[in-house]
Image: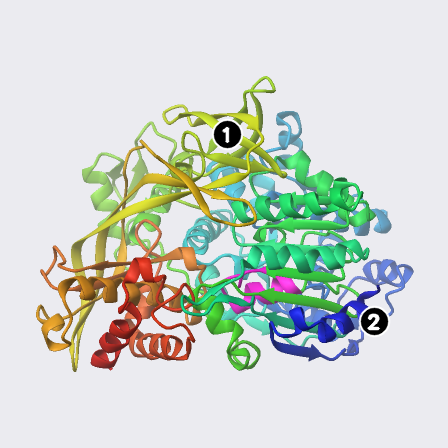
Amino acid sequence: MNLLQILDYFKKDPRIKRCISHWEVIPPRPAVYADFPLGLDKKVISILQKKGIKKLYSHQATAIENILSGKNVVVVTPTASGKTLCYNLPVLSEVLQKEGAKALYLFPTKALSQDQVAELYQLVNLLGEDIKTYTFDGDTPQAARKAIRESGDIVVTNPDMLHQGILPHHTKWLRLFQNLKFVVIDEIHNYRGVFGSHLGNVIRRLTRVCQFYGTSPRFVCCSATIANPEELTRKIIEDEIVLIDNNGAPSGEKHFIFYNPPVINKQLGIRRSYINEAERLSRIFIENDIQTIAFTRSRIKLEVLLSYLKEGLVKKKKSPEILSGYRGGYLPLERRKIERGLREGKILGVISTNALELGIDIGQLDSCVMAGYPGNIASTWQQAGRAGRRNDISVAVLIANSSPLDQYIINNPVYFFGNSPEHGIVDPDNLIILVSHIKCAAFELPFRDGEKFGVETTQKILGHLEENRILHHVEDRWHWTSEAYPADDVSLRSSSVENFVILDSTDENKVIGEVDYFSAPFLIHQDAIYLHEGNQFQIEKLDWEGKKAYAKEVEVDYFTEARTDTRVKVLDVSDQKKTHKGEIFWGEVLVTTKADLFKKIKFHTHENVGWGKIFLPEQEMETTSFWFEFPPDINLQLKMTPIELGGALRALSNVLSNMVPLWVMCDPKDIRSYPELKSTFNEKPTVFVYDNYPGGVGFSKKIFHLYQDLWEASKNLIEKCSCESGCPSCVGPVLEVGEKGKVNALDLLEWIL
């Protein structure tokens, strides 16, 4: 079957048809062209014409005009709309016209920077000019680094390398900073939450170093469609910005299908596994030679889905080599091989986490299957956009899991297709992040008296650092005095200092993957089943101090999931507000988390077939939280027993944490909720919703101001759910919230509202 025949089959097959809650057909759109802007170098125009490009898309021409006139811009258009030319053309034009002009390109990942530089190389080679274009990242050989520093015209890197490898050594990059005309930040929507808050401070440091060398580069940023691209970009670069969103790129017809797995237990509201449904639909595409990408929400789900699909291919006597996984834990050479296989058509299907959500070139795909809602509208469109990168018909299928957020989205298509995407939120002034980068900035250049680094309290922070003997104040300068190298202790992606590596003990301790510090207790504890490329490894030993996990390859019919125990303690109240039924708070909290046991879950049936204990240390995190307290006698007012109230609080907590991403552009795992029957803060029944990052990055603060919307959406979701007593699609399973959990949670919300 071809793609049209498969779509027709979906409409007719009763097993599939009954699960489709919405089918949106997005019509094709023609290209909107514009002439080459005045000021664009004639040689650049000439090579475009040789490539068959006689005109630019409207957004490309508008962006280039603004950039050449000296303005900062943010280009906001869909996937595969030619955003790369928006910055490559003006950069090459300026380098040709102004001797010594330099540019710095920032991409969020090494993989993306290596991919995008290939397109830049092609343009440079066509020009036949000596424009030295280099990638500078952790993989760059030491022997090449000096040449890059001294002669690079366009330096392509990532924020981590700028933070740790370039800014602290700016004196070695004298030629770059003295002649820097452009800073390109691609995929800027990806810099939200903790990553974006770090980047804002890295840009403060970059701007400060540029001012020292007498330069003021223009910023050229590119973004997927989000609600506040101007605001987000302005917060990161702290300068005025021109929004370019007049998309002129053509697109083919796209079919966007919302698919809700069938209910298999109406009383409990349990649906068929969304992973099993993703396997079924992906298999239909792949077995009919439709090149497909499937996205999952976690590395465990990725490996489970990959295993299922490979088993199916073997049964059909097809080579499992046409399928591959793709995620951050895979080693760089492995990822490059997979990308090449997709472009060349040797790989027919790829199962990915959001690692392939970004614009890495993987060729022309026809179908996209999303196993679970990606967490926000922008990411969903990014993933769906990986299919249909030419003018042909394509299809994207969103398969809901049983979480409240997924069920809200799948049953409210008007919200998804009718609303603008969520707001990207960053907080560069997060005290933990800010102080870390002030240390880095002081190492790079002494601070002057009265100098501001983003906040008015900069001088107070400098004084605090002097009290702790990190800085020394002499005359009108604050100098770095510590022997430590501050950038080494600051990770832009998380608060973990370093990752754990996984070693295959059955193959001479070969490195097969890596896991970040905070995920280690849940993914690579002793006896955990670590899945990699469909293969199963059992963790024999976790060396916590050495940051190593030793694994042996096994064949078992189950995978493992860890359970956590959490406690929240209020440290400080930053804001509070009286409502007609009580008080809401926002402030600092200490969250203590411990992985205490793990479950063994059987493949395909997903039944629990065993468990084991985890013996690893607690992890503590100071962060910010929103919380609501109920009166001590709320159970008497609503005629609940203390046990029923506990179930109702757990039910309400489950719903709240899943509803937050409707307003805040965050991943559901970026927010956590925690109910307490008797809080240590006020000895009252309390529900906390906190940022799952040290120091907090603004998510819970925004919810503090949107609490009324949160209550109403939660009530709406619970009322619309068809289950009887509670289920994973609303308040959580009955075993967790009790027989009256659903009814009692509604009573709490009605009392609040």
User: Going 61% across and 49% down the picture, which residue do you hit?
Assistant: 305
Q: Position of residue 679 (x, y in %)?
A: 14, 58
Q: Amino acid at mark 1?
A: Gln
Q: Nearer the viewer, residue 588 or 283?
A: 283
The Cα atoms of the two marked residues, 1 and 2, are separated by 57 Å
In the depicted structure, whether residue 584 falls above or below residue 117: below
Foreground: disc 1 or disc 2: 1
Residue under label 2? 55
Q: Please give the label number shown on residue 73.
A: none
Q: Of the two numbered discs 1 and 2 on the same chain, state the one appearing first in sequence.
A: 2
SS of the residue under disc 1: strand
User: Going 70% across and 78% down the picture, which residue do you hit?
Assistant: 26
Q: Mark 2: few, some, or many residues within 10 Å (few <14, many ≥20)? A: some
Q: Nearer the viewer, residue 662 or 349?
A: 349
Q: Mark 1: few, some, or many residues within 10 Å (few <14, many ≥20)? A: many
SS of the residue under disc 2: loop
Q: Nearer the viewer, residue 579 or 221?
A: 579
**Which segment did they paint magenta?**
371-384
Residue under label 1? 538
Q: Tell me: 305 left or right of 751.
A: right
Considering every residue shown, the one lying at the far top of the view is: 508
